Amino acid sequence: MQHLKIICPNGHLGFAPLRTESFELGVRAEPHYIAADSGSDDVGPVPLGSDTSTSPEAWQRHDLEHMLVAARRLAVPMIIGSAGDTGSNSRVDRYVRIIQELAQQHGMRKLRVGYFYSEVDKEALRGKMRRGQVVQGLDGFADLTDSELDATDRIVAMAGVHPYLELLRRGADVIIGGRSSDAAVFAAPALHHGFAADHAYYLGKVLECASFCAEPYGGKETVMGTISVEDVRVTAMHPQQRCTVASVSGHAMYERSNPYEEFFAGGRLDMSGCRYEQLDERTARITGSRFVPDRKVRVKLEGAGRVGERFVGLCGIRDPYTVANVDRVIGWARDQVRQRFGETGYELHYTVYGRDGVMGELEPLRERPGHELCVMVQGVAPTREMAEEVTMIGLRQMFYARLPDVKGTAGSVAFPLDEVLPASPAYRWTLNHTVEVEDPMELFSVHMVDAGL
């Protein structure tokens, strides 16, 4: 094979429906694979901890149906990674079920569905720790302790290319992956067909977010990546989009603490020597990427643990004096909660939009708030009743806050709703770690089932 073409229609399958027009243009280009990632820890710890999806099943089914019908029409494999936002076992099972239902609905001939699980048993991980293995923290997380493991509800391991390669070797027509590196979904088929890791991993990197590597910006549009022995090429399928030197090199820096490297189970992609060229109006060419294998394989682990029940309330502030003294208003409300519930046993969070609600302490204009503010109040507690009351006091007492120069009694905050609203239970990230494995497949189990008639 001189070259391999893969189309990616969605950078997070199901998070918002793919755009069908550019997808059909991609299908007409006759790719050898249709693939997409379906998960991210950007959605926060709640879906993993609670074993749910942030995306409606109808949206997930929409994308899976378009991809499956096209893949069967072209007789090419279809690959999905990090099923259902988190890649937990139940999300993989959901996608396998949907594929089987769609194959039956469309009267498709029998096809082989390969899938793998990524969940990690807590006690198996504890056993590694007991045997002296250090589960190393990333990005400021301390090395894993028994107490943090005890506080964890669910753990997934981030697969590299290895389970995808195994399922391709077994002849799967459709692959549904558990939690995975985004790029592995695309790098694996390139490696399966004998292309060099240097180019294969960059192909994965550039395709992982679909049209995020194109300009002008437009989400959920299809792009096509082409790998050869010489280079990687990426082409925007939407007629009004283009993959340029600027857009593609810029995407290589997306969500990176170091814009020149990305880590995988078994190695890292070194992009410091990449060279970008404009081939035509909608296609960029990339050379010079390099994959550096590790001597030992470390697999990333993500874990989430439940904190408590949660309620949310909102208020608006327009009075200039209250805007200037919003921290004192919040302090007053906190004191009222402390008088009712004491110092511990709950959490109370205030987010001030219009001042630093997005960037927090990093906000450079924090001392220059807007003329009106929105304050979001979140109360977290062991029970729904307590969480509701914590939030209610923390919100309503902002209305009654006594500031030294206020003479009136009407209050200086406005409530868009008279109530606080129940939210999903609060979870936190407990694991952002890596663990060494002897076998890259150690934490992943692969399976095959039939679909269709």
Image (spheres, rainbow, N blue to C red):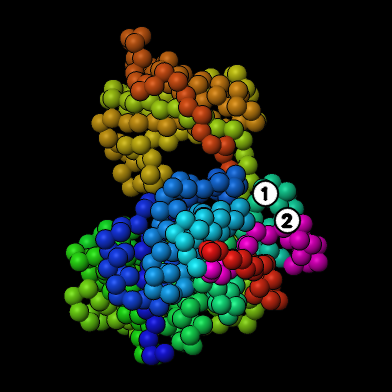
Question: Any magenta on residue 6?
Answer: no
Position in image of residue 234 (x %, y %): 31, 75
Residue at image coords 27%, 77%: 284
* 2 or 1: tag closer to the N-terminus: 2
Question: Any magenta on residue 118?
Answer: yes
Q: Are marks 2 and 1 in contact (CB under 8 Å)?
A: yes
* Disc 2: which residue: 122
Position in image of residue 61 (x %, y %): 45, 53
Position in image of residue 381 (x %, y %): 61, 30
**Callout 1: SS:** loop
Q: Amino acid at mark 1?
A: Thr
What's drawn in magenta, residue-wise? 110-133
Residue at image coords 60%, 78%: 170
Which labelled disc corresponds to residue 257? none
For the residue pair 245 and 15, the one nearer the viewer reads as 15
Residue at image coords 59%, 47%: 51
Q: Amino acid at mark 2?
A: Lys
**Callout 2: SS:** helix
Q: Is residue 312 visible?
A: yes
